[in-house]
Image (cartoon, coloured by chain):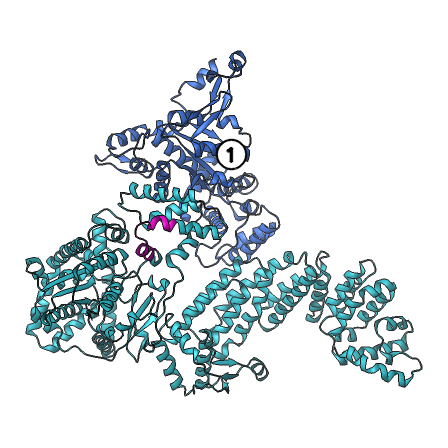
Chain colours: A blue, B cyan
Amino acid sequence: MAITKKILTEVSSALRQHAEQEFSEELAVLSRHDDRAKPVNWKLSPWAVRMYLVGGTLPDGKVISPKYIGNVRLIEIAVATLATDRALLLYGLPGTAKSWVSEHLAAAISCDSTLLIQGTAGTDESAIRYGWNYAQLLASGPSADAIVPSPMMRAMIDGKLARVEELTRIGNDVQDTLITILSEKTLPIPELGSGVQAAKGFNVIATANNRDKGVNELSSALMRRFNTVVLPVPDSLDEEVQIVERRVDQLGRALALPVAKPAIEEIRRVVTIFRELRNGVTTDGKTKVKSPSGTLSTAEAISVINGGLAMAGYYGDGVLKADDLAAGVTGSIVKDPAQDAIVWKEYLQTVVKEREGWKDLYRACREII
Amino acid sequence: MKLNIFGIRHHGPGCSRSLNNAIELLQPDILLIEAPPEGEDVIELAAHPDMSPPVAMIVYPPDKPDDAVFYPFASFSPEWNAIQYALKKNISLRLIDLPWKHRFALDEIEKENITKQQSEDSVSVDSCANEVIVEVDIDDTSDKSFAQQIIEDPLGVLSRASGFEDNETWWEQVIEQSKGESLEIFDGIFEVMSVLRERVFAECGEDNRDNNNSCNKKSDEDNLDNNNSTNNKYNKKSGKFTKHFLRGKYELLRESWMRQSIRKAISEGFQKIAVVCGAWHAPVLNVVSDSELLFKLTPTEQQDNFLLRKLPKSKVSVTWTPWTFSRLAYRSGYGAGVAAPGWYEHLWTFSEQAVIRWISLAARLLRAESLDASSANVIEAVRLSETLASLRGRPVVGITEVNEAILTVLCRGDFVLLELIRRKLETGFRIGSVPKETPAVPLLRDIETEQKRLRMKVSEEIISVDFDLRKETDRAKSRLLHRLNLLGIDWGKLQQDQVRSTGTFHEFWQLRWQVEFLVRIIESNALGNTLESAVSNAIRIKADSIRSLPELTALIESVLPAEVSADVIDELLERLRNESAVSSDVSGLMLAIPPLVNVLQYGNVRGTKAERLAPVYNAIFERILVGLIPASASLDDDAAVRRIVEVDAVQNSLKLYSSAEQRKDWQKVLSAITKDDVIHGLLRGRCTRILYEDGTISGEDLSCSLGLAVTTAIDAIKVAQWMQGFLCGSGQLLLQFDLLWSILNSWVCSLTDEVFKELLPLLRRAFSEFSAPEIRMMGEKIKQLEIQNNSVTKIKSKITTTAQTKKIQLDKQRIKLVIPILQEIISD
């Protein structure tokens, strides 16, 4: 009982607050200024939602901080999609702020980002539809009281946004539960001979990786019911280097690695390699290269640098060098020993070998494969 | 008398529709259109049944077709519709822009002035350059005067004022898709442009007046110079404008000319005059208005007269040429292009349900590519585009919203698919056509000039010629023929074999002119006005359609003798580099090597610069090194035969052109192949042979590999494949290398009869490629060996039935019967 209480009570000292709590002030200000037409049950108008996400200055000089930095048009498409009561699928590589955008959209539109279903291989139908309170069920048979509503069901009743994270991790049979919800906007409860009809304002935002392996591809029936917005990887090299540097720094401190500071030059090299292989073209845009089967996300670059730092700290001289990185870089690129090895070798021969000042990295990598 | 001025945007379908309605309403008795008056000679052709837009009117100086200017017309161009109306109703039609005969001549004078200045004073050139740099700097700063902003981009100013990001969208939203009354729209455009022009006039107008007034005082000569200096200034800034109030080159003169033409029409007594011109010009063309504002903007007849006095003249030709949607997207004659001609045509054809139809078309395209695109999705895409438009505060859905909706709903966020749709729908592959009666196009003139210059006779008889490429004229002739070939005009056919046999200095051609070539030339004129530019573009198009590497290298090889500009070659090399980088097809890479080496090796005869090619060649070679072994792992018999051909091709090319390091790397790969049991025997045998001939492996090593490869421990078929690979090509090795002979011999001897029979075809194939003398020598060798060693009897009875090697009593009569058949066997 004590634990339940703890779970249910709002803890102001939470490690991380929900978006609508953290930015409650901005939401309130926007709401005051928002005199445009709102779809039913929306807390803000589409115009204000857009402003909340991309930032801006209100007529009275209040500044709204940008939540998503990148292509504004994508956010416009996302908001317009939700306004046409089509479900929104945010697609993209890991670490492209999909969940972040989804949370903030829910916070701005429904002022509630907690109606969340976390997709895993073990997610079952009851997580999306409803479960049973078995004591009640045994005592008085199937009744509305015995039903434990899922976040989806609650969103439908209240006319709010439901979020499904990692949709492609959920098994296909369970995924397809969404089809009826998305097209008919009802959730049948056969045991009671009734169902829940979604109130206006209900909609679904799902996120999914498009390059991870071992995922359950969406059936085309489900795909058809979503509008897909692909969130791109960081635009520029510098932006990505910055992200990696910041995260490496934070993680390094958390792990208490015995290294003073990650060398920015090495980070730049790793990020450059990852970007070039990912994009299939060198940064100067002059040479095309093949892309390996792995994702090579920003997150992986971070772990490569961290691994290198650990190597340098425990086994090397404490300074991050090409030798410390070679194994990590090779490991994250060569996921498929046959195809990726060719890609990586070709890249080493045609790009790394020729590049000024990269001889050490070339040699270190050639030693490994 | 009534004067109506219709300010339009070139290629605006909405404008077209409104213009059509307005003209229909007005029923004018004369139409004046902003287009070069020279075009009046060919304007009648516009109504010809064979004329089908997109077409372009070309105006060019006959001696310099490359300076040509184009006036493209699409079915949705307002001018085109106005012209069609006038021709159909048989009312007077005049083209009233400043004639190009004056503009070309002014350009000429200007060029001469520049060269004169340069030759007179080299210091001033330096200061001039500095000046230009400074001016560019000024351009970059954001605090431009409002007038400057208006001049540079009048629509941009209006769009920004209405809260749009780009003027394209603004115009489309406000004018093109507007549903207002036709005449009102033009009044609106007229009014808004008047305000803009007035603002410019207020800021820089003094200049204008001064200019005009001073014209009155100064002598004619000065006036001309004055004009030219303004133009000079404009030119130096590479199209950008900073100080003066002119929006384009010769704008002052052009507007004067248009006004004078209008005045002339009035004085001739036309009652209902309709003028169709670019919106920017509209406010200054109203010569009869009594409004004070317009009066201020519009110079008087005297002033115009003065400006237009004594303009220099030059010769001008004009004709029609077929045009393409993709070229319509460029900026040209009018200084205006359209980004998505396909969309505009669509808007023109289906004004009511444009968006729905467009998205349906996109869905159809996707279905044609076997992708899922249901009608329900089309509905959702239409809804999304409408919601997006309203979220952005747009009155109607534009192409941006449509594209984004298609991307999100139909393409599932996949940009590649969207690009496909955009390429097919927006730019399309439409090409127009012109009637046969159309006067000759500049490209034909250019080709004829070249033919005359080189004294090449055009005849329908077959003429054989021999060019010595060391001679300048012969090289030029060869170049002309190569270029025409690239345009698909096979006037000359290169006789390949003779070239090879007489070295690279000579080319033998057979010439035969065909009448159909003319059609081809007219079509090709859409690609360029001179042979060189047309060929360059033809090559680009060809390169775009090529999907395989060997084709691409072959194209490069065929392009070099045509001696096109370095840019084109660079583009091809760029393409080659990109294709080879993403290609996982090692065969393609290997087959691409020989043509490249040909160019690298022999390119110098024509002065081609091979340096640019070498890095590409090196990169391809590196990729072959990396990919060859994995790609050779599981080859079937046919594939192995093909791979041998490819390996040989690379090997032979390396002999011609390679660094020592490259040869070493290549040998390393080959020797790795010989040692890899997984690889097909044919290929391993062949690689062993190459390495031995190269001297990479010594006789001793060879006998070691032979011992390993040719042994009863391995499946006989595999041994036979290895032998075939090793022996194919030439039998000399077998003759000279006794050890090989004896290993082969003892292996063959060890075979059982059944296995031998099974292998016989394989061995036969290996031996069949040997030349007749080699086979005879082998026979002799057997004979010789037999004396040394009696054990050979066994092999001789199996491997050959050549009678001469048998030491038995022969019946000469019976032998005579066999000999013809034997001859046949041996010789085949």
Q: How many marks?
A: 1
Magenta span: predominant SS is helix
Q: Which residue is mark 1?
A: A176
Mark 1 neighbour density, 10 Å: few (under 14) some (14–19) many (20 or more) = some
Please state which of residues B75 and B231 is positioned toward the viewer in this rendering: B75
Please identify the quadrant where the N terminus of chain B is shown. bottom left
Residue at the outermost top position: A139
Q: Is residue B738 left or right of residue B60?
A: right
Of B654 and A247, the residue lying toward us: B654
Is A282 inside the magenta-drawn segment? no
Q: Relative to the observer, which residue lies in front, B473 or B328? A: B328
Residue shown at 34% from the left, 47% from the top: B401
**Chain letter behind tag 1:** A
Q: Quadrant of residue B168?
A: bottom left
Q: Is B353 in the magenta?
A: yes
Q: Amino acid at mark 1?
A: Asp
Whether residue B457 is visible to the viewer of this picture, yes or no, is: yes
Q: Which residues are magenta?
A: B343-359
Q: Name the residue located 53 percent from the left edge and 11 percent from the top edge.
A: A139
